[in-house]
Amino acid sequence: MSEYAEPLESTHSDEHVEHPGYGTFIKVWVALVILTFCLVSLSHVSQSYAVWGLLTLTPLKAGLVFYYFMHLKYEGPLFKIVILVTLGTLLIFFALLFSDVAFH
Amino acid sequence: MSGHVHRDDFGSRLGMWLFLVTEMVLFGGLFIAYSYMRYKYPADFHHGGAELNATLGVTNTLVLLTSSLTVVLAIVAVQRAEKQRAIAFLSTTLVLGVTFLVIKGFEWGAKFHHGLYPNAPHLATMPPGEQVFFGLYFTMTGLHGVHVIAGLSLLGVMLWWVVTDRIRQGRYIHLENSGLYWHLVDVIWIFLLPLFYLAA
């Protein structure tokens, strides 16, 4: 079977037809770099600022990578649901652990 | 042999994402362990973080963020049939990935030199919280490093496939999936930076 039998292929490669250009991703990268420097600056201010930076800026950076670089913005609801269920599961484990810790 | 090849890029991406969520749970478990241990030994984690080189941590973050950008730009280039650009972007990613590992190697080397490595006699004399801190540091950055090596190997194959036209306009799902893996490796490092290097 030829790998290159393109004319006969039934292809689903273009469900996400709208392809973003170079500019979109470069802007996201600039935002990620700025957020990294904000995070580093906050960690120099005080311990509580550092923790708040960790809890807000880090998920924001991860969200930008997921949404743009990993093309979630251009995917249907199924992928988003899979990821939200995963994050929800982790959050439940986290809550269970700390509720246990709280009663010790 | 009908010569008819069925392709389902959506299914392929879904499969990759399902694998990636297992990776998220793997690292998520370690992040939960970290948060409990940090809650239990706040001062020791502070001291442990002070021993790490934040400049190297931030530099590696910038290296990895940029390598993520060049992967996604390589996909845009393939979509536009700009082969030379795609090759240039992917090669940049590989160089940056290797740079990350070299910096990591120097950093671990310096730690080893100071008697900080798993099961080291010097480590055993430190407070329990710092032992846990360095245990988690070596486990999590080590596991991440293994992922970087795996990602680089994958992207090396992708580069070869772009060169040989196996990946081209309208047929780049393998590059997209390898890119997804590389971005997840980047996301994990985004969390490792503040947890370890900025903990002091």
Image (cartoon, coloured by chain):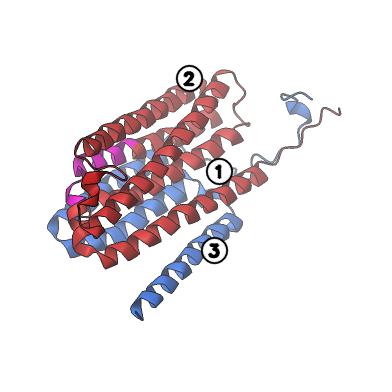
- Mark 1 and mark 2: Cα distance apart in space: 23 Å
Mark pair 2, 3: CA separation: 40 Å
The chain coloured blue carries which letter?
A
Q: Is residue A30 left or right of residue B15?
A: left
Figure quadrant of residue B133: bottom left
Report crowding for label 2: few under 14, some 14 to 19, many 20 or more residues within 10 A (C-alpha). Answer: some
Which structural element holds mark 1? loop
Residue B84 has which mark?
2
Residue B52 sits inside the magenta stretch? yes
- The picture places residue B115, in percent across and down from the top left corner, at 21, 40
Chain bearing mark 3: A
User: For the residue marked with disc 3, what is the amino acid?
Assistant: Val
Q: Residue at x 41, y 71 (%)?
A: A97
Please tell me whether residue B146 belongs to the stretch shown in magenta.
no
* Residue where numbered disc 3 is placed: A85
- Give how far apart the Cα atoms at labels 3 and 1 are: 27 Å
Farthest residue, direction right: B2
Amino acid type at mark 1: Glu
Q: Which residue is mark 1?
A: A18
Instruction: From the image, give the main secondary structure of the stretch colored magenta.
Output: helix
The residue sitting at 35% across, 44% down in the picture is: B141
The C terminus of chain B: image quadrant: bottom left
Whether residue B78 sits left or right of residue B29 in the image: it is: right
Quarter placement of the N terminus of chain B:
top right
Where does the image place residue B188, in percent across and percent down from the top left? 40, 48
Q: Which numbered mark, 1 or 2, is in the foreground of this view?
A: 2
Residue in the image at 43% along x and 43% along y: B185
